[in-house]
Image (spheres, rainbow, N blue to C red):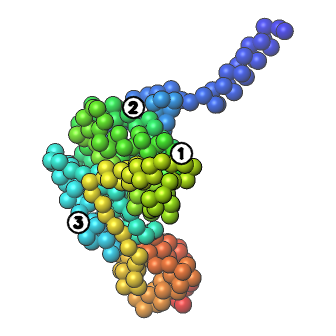
Amino acid sequence: MKRNELIQLATTVLQRLDAILPPLAQEPDWTAVAYRWHKLGNKGILESLPHPHTFALNCLAAVDEQRRQLVRNTEQFLAGRPANNVLMTGARGTGKSSLVKALLHQYAAQGLRLVEVDKGDLLTLPALLTMLALRPEKFILFCDDLSFEDGDDAYKALKTTLDGGLSQRCDNVLVYATSNRRHLMPEYMADNTAQTGSGGEVHPQEAVEEKVSLSDRFGLWLSFYPFDQDAYLQAVENWLEQVGLHLDDTTKRAALNWSQSRGSRSGRVAWQFVCDWVGREPQERKV
């Protein structure tokens, strides 16, 4: 093989390897206000998000009490006072994730930062906490739509993060998680019997305690409930106001028809309706 051919072959191999190898770890952009954590071996990469999806807290409808408690907890955290990790559970589309995103809009200027952590990357949380503990900002680790299946060990890393393990819990880090499951792990009818568990489990009650112990580590539980018609229309009105429109009779009828076609009323459905309504031509809004 000629020298030029050998160089070309080596270059091709290196390019193919570069395409599959993970990027080199770099210092995060600490001027950003939002990040996403990616697992990389036993550690990870903190990727900055230059344009996070945020909006004002008053855009959200029918969650006044949940918002009040979450804001109070977050303000305690920012002030350096004791605050709790938060678990938000309940009906889908009712504002659990949106409340966390809105907190960033409200408090980023006061040093609040948001780090999105996917369930699959939880095993490398210790590396992330080591990185964040040295920073002056206050970080919320945002775990959206969190749940675990039997045999999934990622929840053990989260338990250690919530309670600190042998090391102290980071003073500048809290975990805010959302889930449709109150206890984050599947439960079975057999769990509620005093008999031997499935697979010959001698102490089934201890297995139940293991499942419940994760959600117990969240100091603040917030529950979200399905919207009634008034709450749904209020959500529609709030989102319309953000684009300079109003909820007149025509828009109200269209919003109700939209929710009936979806078979659901929620803040998410309200937002989806407004996206459709605003995107229409003016003559198409006459229904």
Name the mark nearer the viewer: 1 or 2.
1
Residue at horizontal 43 percent and vertical 70 percent from the top: 91
Q: Which residue is mark 2?
A: 127
- Secondary element at tag 1: loop
Q: Which residue is mark 3?
A: 68
Looking at the picture, does residue 255 appear above or below residue 81? below
Asked whether 42 or 4 is in front, the reply is 42
Q: Earlier in the sequence, mark 1 or mark 3?
A: 3
* Residue 239 in sight from this viewpoint: no
Classify residue 115 as left or right of residue 167: right
Whole-percent x, y for residue 150 in the image? 53, 50
How much space separates mark 2 and mark 3, taking CA atoms? 32 Å
- Secondary element at tag 3: helix
Whole-percent x, y for residue 136 in the image? 23, 36
Residue at horizontal 44 percent and vertical 87 percent from the top: 252
Q: Which residue is mark 1?
A: 151
Residue at horizontal 60 percent and vertical 28 percent from the top: 21
Quarter of the N terminus within the rendering:
top right
Amino acid tagged 1: Gly
Amino acid tagged 2: Ala
Displayed quadrant of residue 88: bottom left
Looking at the picture, does residue 91 appear above or below residue 249? above
Whole-percent x, y for residue 99 in the image? 34, 62
- Secondary element at tag 2: helix
Amino acid tagged 3: Arg
How much space separates mark 1 and mark 2, taking CA atoms? 23 Å
